[in-house]
Structures are given as C-alpha cells and as structure tokens.
C-alpha cells in the first residue's frame, strides 16, 4: 500500500531514556523514505541536508531529518564521534519507522554526511535487506571499517575533488565494500560542498541513486 497523502510533522523517537527529535516529510504516493544521519556538529537544521532533502522529495521520496544526539549530548565533543552510539540511534529510528502505520511499508534508505555516513553503514549491516540504499556525502566510511564488508545495500560515495584526505579514505572504503557500489568525485568541491553548483550535483546524484533502489516501479 502506498502513502495516500502528504505528511509533514515533527516526530519524537525513543532510544532508552532519551528521545530524538526529527522532521518527517512524506510526499503523496511515496514508496521510499530516506533517513538523514548528520555529521559531527550538525543537526536536522543543516541547510545542506535540508536542501538535499527538498530535492529528494521533489523526486517522490520521503525524508526524515533527525538529531541523533540530544542537545546535552552534543555538547560533549567525544560523543559526536561515538559511531557505536550514533549507529544505535539509527537502529532505534529504523525500527520505530517500521512500527508506525504511516511509514512501515516504505523502503528505507540512508543519507549520511561526515561521521553520519559511518553510522549509516554500520547500522545497515545490522539490518541487512531492510535498508535499500545508502548515499554518503563527504563521509567518513573508514570509521565503520570493520563493518564495510558486511554492507548489503547499494552504496554511493560522493566526495569533493578538493577534499584530498577524505578522497583517499573513501577510496579505501570503496575497495572494501562488496555490495553494489559507486564512487563519485565532484571536481572543485571541498568537504562541505559550499562551492557554487556542487551541492546541486550531490543532490541530483543522491536522488537518482535512491530512485533507482527505493522507488517501486
């Protein structure tokens, strides 16, 4: 059964004693939903991820932008790099989505930036075929190194052409991933894709990847 109406609301997703706040938007007729895992120091208010989410919705995909850490947790710099905790929160989020009437029938994809990409990849290994596709933007997939061989979801790694160290880390991660995979290096882009036109390229690449693997034809 496809989604019958547009949905736009805040959601509160429990993980133990904590609750994550998220912005859920699902276009009418959507069959896929992309969960955003933000990078260190970022949040559901990230203008870059919100731009990408807008583009994904224009392609008929639902989006969930959420804060994996509480406000207090985010003040602890080390917690921003606790990939195990971030992955635990992604896992709790995905299980919650599969229990909700509005989202339980939707194919799930992950969009991860920076450390969020590592959390997305690690979580995907625990969920197997439940995750339909993954896109990493300027990600640190190397931080999920022990899990990369177990990733089953088709994975797209997008890196800025002027993000030298991260290019190398992504290429090493790409070599270790055994699933369907692709790596794209955007010429002239730095880590945050702030250069004119570069984020637009990222959004279109991500949209085509998710449409290919999440939208039921």
Image: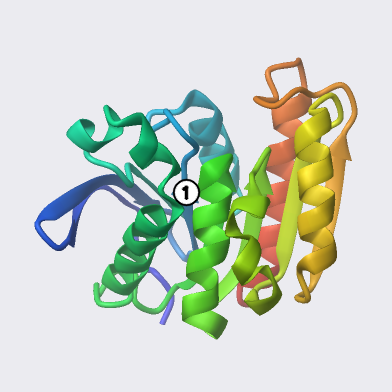
* Residue 108 point in image, percent of width and height: 49, 69
- Depth check: 182 or 140 in front? 140
Q: Quadrant of residue 110?
A: bottom right
Q: Quadrant of the N terminus?
A: bottom left
Is the residue 120 above or below the residue 163 in the image? below
Q: Nearer the viewer, residue 69 or 65?
A: 69
Protein image colouring: rainbow
Image location of residue 24, percent across then percent down: 33, 50
Q: Nearer the viewer, residue 167 or 11?
A: 167
Query: Would you place residue 35 above or below residue 193 in this image?
Result: below
Q: Residue furthest right?
A: 187
Quarter occupied by residue 58? top right
- Residue depicted at x 86% and y 39%: 185
| Image spot of residue 193 (x, y percent) | 70, 25
Residue for point 65% across, 43% down = 139
Asked which secondary structure carries label 1, the reply is strand
**Residue drawn at (79%, 33%) of the image:** 165
């Amino acid at each position: 059964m496809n989604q019958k109406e547009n949905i736009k609301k805040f959601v509160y997703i429990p993980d133990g004693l904590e609750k994550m706040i998220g912005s859920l938007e699902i276009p009418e007729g959507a069959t896929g939903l992309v969960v955003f895992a933000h990078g260190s120091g970022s949040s559901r208010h990230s203008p870059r991820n919100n731009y990408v989410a807008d583009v994904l919705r224009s392609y008929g995909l639902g989006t969930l932008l959420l804060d994996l850490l509480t406000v207090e947790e985010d003040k602890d710099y080390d917690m921003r790099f606790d990939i195990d905790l971030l992955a635990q929160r992604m896992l709790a989020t995905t299980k919650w989505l599969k229990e909700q009437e509005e989202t339980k029938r939707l194919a799930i994809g992950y969009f991860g930036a920076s450390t969020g990409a590592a959390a997305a990849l690690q979580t995907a290994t625990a969920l197997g075929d439940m995750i339909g596709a993954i896109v990493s933007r300027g990600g640190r997939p190397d931080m999920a190194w022990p899990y990369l061989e177990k990733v089953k979801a088709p994975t797209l790694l997008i890196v800025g052409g002027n993000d030298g160290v991260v290019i190398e880390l992504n290429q090493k991660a790409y070599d270790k991933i055994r699933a369907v995979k692709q790596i794209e290096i955007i010429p002239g882009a730095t880590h945050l894709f702030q250069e004119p036109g570069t984020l637009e390229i990222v959004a279109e690449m991500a949209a085509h990847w998710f449409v290919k693997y999440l939208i039921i034809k």
